[in-house]
Image (spheres, rainbow, N blue to C red):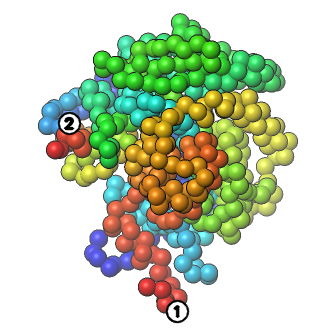
Amino acid sequence: MATGSRMEPFLCDIAVIGAGPAGLAAAAAAAEAGRRVIIADEGLASGGQIWRPDIRHGSPPTARSWQSRLEASCALTLSRTSIVSIRRPSASGPLVLTGECDGAARVIHAKRVVLATGARELFVPFPGWTLPGVVGVGGAQALLKSGLDVQGKRVVIAGSGPLLLPVAASMARAGARLLVVAEQARRASVIGYATSLWRQPSLIARAARYRAAFVRASFVTGTWVKAATAQAGRIAATLSDGHRDRVYQCDLLCAAFGLVPNTELARQMGCDVRDGRVVVDEQQRTSVLDVFCAGEPTGIGGAELALLEGETAGRAAAGVAEASAPRRRRARLVAQASRMNEAFALRPELRHLADGDTIVCRCEDVRLGEIDRAWSPRQAKLYTRVGMGPCQGRICGAALHFLFDWTHDTIREPVQPAGLSTLLADAIASEIEPHPDTTKA
Amino acid sequence: MTHANAVVRIMVDGRLTDAPAGSTVAAALIGAGITQFRESVSGEPRAPLCGMGVCYECRVAIDGQAHRRACMVRVRDGMTVSTAYGDR
């Protein structure tokens, strides 16, 4: 790109960020309503995390049907594209999105935006969690689907929530030697949640199929990981039920504790975010004009709710009348999600796993003992650099929220690391119609 | 999707390695026995954590471009990868 030249932007009516269930549904619905739609996603293929294609087995059937529907709809897909900023440089102009694909800048002009940025895993720091071989639960699944060979590997899964079952099942099917699957929630909570699903026998049947796939490993409840150490090329993982500790020698320790909504772009745009969730109305509108949000960023609710919200957001953004989702179905899914979040609420013991020497911010290697919980997140940043590395606090910010009840600090563009040409393109794009009073330096 | 047994050949820290076609660099490196992807600011070994582009722990140099997330890039025949600590 010639320095100073203005990059030709992609033009569209609606830009959808994220191609998981919510984004696919939003893009398909908006395109079917006749709008010009661009859907941008960071991944190598659409589907998000839940429908990430397996390089050996392809995508699940539900994912394929939505992908075909999107293909048929004429929406334009930009894969491997990270959106690092969204703003409206002039009140009458378009929303300007700046992104990056393989190091090259991408600029999109859109009338409306649907944020479908999904969720990430919550990592709770414990001694040894920075060791190579300690990965997330969904993280392990992502690596496995991306070609990781786990044949004969000794694997421990210690985390929380319904995700443990499919991950354990795929590990076992891929030939891993699963030593134990540990759910931190109490047995009564897990059984209570399972019982509440009696009206959805298909979910129960699916859970039973997963369990059958790793039948040789034990599934324990009320048990969590306390610490990990490196021992002779392996990881020694200590699991505890509060009374007794047990040590497992493994190659891979999968340890994460549920999901955290990705709200960075929403916050960068100034959308109202409460309790870590983007606030939306019945048509998935955020507090910012022309910005919609669907799926996990509005609260962890699973793929079915994400599809419903995505379709609603896509129709609403396209200006379709009667865009609201069927109320009863939505209410049922929301109720189910809140039962799930309640059943798998994290036990207080997890707040005390890290000691003063445990690294909390992995980018800047800030240890828990260096941080005073009486500080504000801003003070902690200034004094210790916590949250100032490449992940921009995505890992430690959520951890400190869990440990100290800290709320997010403000976030500015670019919301993730970007190359100089992207920053330049962003600077140029944001001055599309310069204000007459450009007094700021 | 690719053939189950198809492989591509990549160069990892100067060593030729076969990797499953279609796999990510992160999966390929672990498969090649690489346990340390980078060195943290205080000198600790680090390797992939999130597997989905969030944590930046799997940063390596790919085809001469530093700080690429290994979990977000697919292997390609002839690709060269260098882990940060391997550079020194």
- Image quarter of the C terminus of chain B: top left
Please report the residue visible at 40 percent of the width from the left and 24 percent of the height from the top: A229
Q: In this rendering, is residue A315 above or below B74?
A: below
Residue at the spot of label 1: A437
Are both tags, 2 and 1, on one chain?
Answer: no
Say which amino acid is labelled 2.
Val
> Residue lying furthest top in this view?
A216
Residue A104 lies left or right of residue A288; in this view the side is: left
Task: Compare residues A347 and A93 and report the one nearer the observer.
Answer: A347
Residue A175 lies left or right of residue A375; in this view the side is: left
Could you say where residue A171 lies in the image, as x and y percent from the top left? 47, 19
Could you say where residue A264 lies in the image, as x and y percent from the top left? 56, 56
Chain of the residue on which disc 1 is drawn? A
Please report the residue visible at 68 percent of the width from the left and 70 percent of the height from the top: A289
Please report the residue visible at 27 percent of the width from the left and 75 percent of the height from the top: A2
> Quick one: SS at disc 1?
loop
Between the C-alphas of marks 2 and 1, the distance is: 53 Å
Could you say where residue A382 lies in the image, as x and y percent from the top left? 47, 61
Q: In this rendering, is residue B48 above or below A314?
A: above
- Residue A237 - label: none
Say which amino acid is labelled 1.
Asp
- Residue B12 - label: 2
Quarter location, residue A338: top right
Q: Count numbered badges in the picture.
A: 2
